[in-house]
Image (cartoon, grey):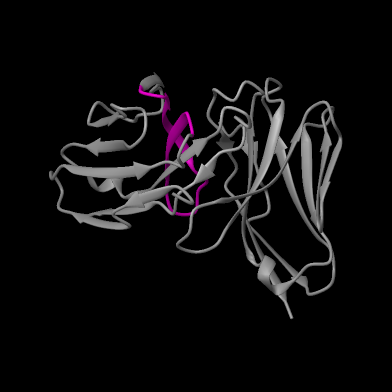
Amino acid sequence: GAGVSQSPRYKVAKRGQDVALRCDPISGHVSLFWYQQALGQGPEFLTYFQNEAQLDKSGLPSDRFFAERPEGSVSTLKIQRTQQEDSAVYLCASSLVAEKNIQYFGAGTRLSVL
Amino acid sequence: DQQVKQNSPSLSVQEGRISILNCDYTNSMFDYFLWYKKYPAEGPTFLISISSIKDKNEDGRFTVFLNKSAKHLSLHIVPSQPGDSAVYFCAASDLSGNTPLVFGKGTRLSVIA
């Protein structure tokens, strides 16, 4: 595709519900990052994939958060038993090997946990 | 403890004048810096970057200056246009590309016609 695509754009969940957020990176991009952006803050790192390998998950805030990228393309971020503090915009970014410091972002998924 | 700081939450500039957005960092391991622009309901869009081996990088109306000794960088936009009104994020990483970006909190720029 032309850019990074994320779905859904908006998600409302009841506390305790599980959610799954999808990211379609730019075709051919090897690296994929997930970030969480709270209101009034900058994006904060959650996890990083190179192809299908999850190389860094140090930013995941709890074991309720899980990410996968089984075929090295589409990635899913799953949050189990959502809590109110999980409410945020979840951003996905991908990057090319050749310009690996420049990350290209999707529009994000705004999650609201009631 | 914030490693990348943008101390001005907002900035207002008249159309045609220069906009200067500032960013400070604390981690001396950072050697690559990026500026992103974000409109409401959109993801951040890459604007310009600079590596630590340079002190200036220019792209059209946008120039980024890096002062390594002061651990400070700035983004200059000249002339400013109403379409530049957005939130600007400063981000830092190392040159390997395998590390995440560390972002500041952003500066909201308003360019007034």
Q: Nearer the viewer, residue B37 or A100?
A: A100
Q: Position of residue B71 (x, y in %)?
A: 77, 31
Residue at x 68% of width, y 25% of height:
B30
Can residue A114 be seen in this snapshot? no
**Residue A45 inside the magenta-drawn segment:** yes
With respect to residue B80, does A85 lie above or below? above
Residue A104 x/y as whole percent: 53, 43
Q: Residue at x 28, y 54 (%)?
A: A8
Q: Residue at x 68, y 54 (%)?
A: B8
- Magenta part of the protein: which range? A29-52
Hey, which residue is sitting farthest bottom in the picture? B113
The x and y percentages for residue B47 are: 67, 50
Q: Considering the image in quadrants, where does the C terminus of chain A appear?
A: bottom left
Q: Magenta segment: does it hold B81?
A: no
Give the residue drawn at x 37%, y 43%: A24
Say whether residue A72 is left or right of residue B48: left
Q: Quadrant of residue A18?
A: top left
Residue B106 in view of the camera: yes
Q: How many marks?
A: 0
Relative depth, front residue between A34 and A43: A34
Residue B60 placed where, x, y %? Answer: 82, 56
Q: Name the one closer to the observer, B72 or A24.
A: A24
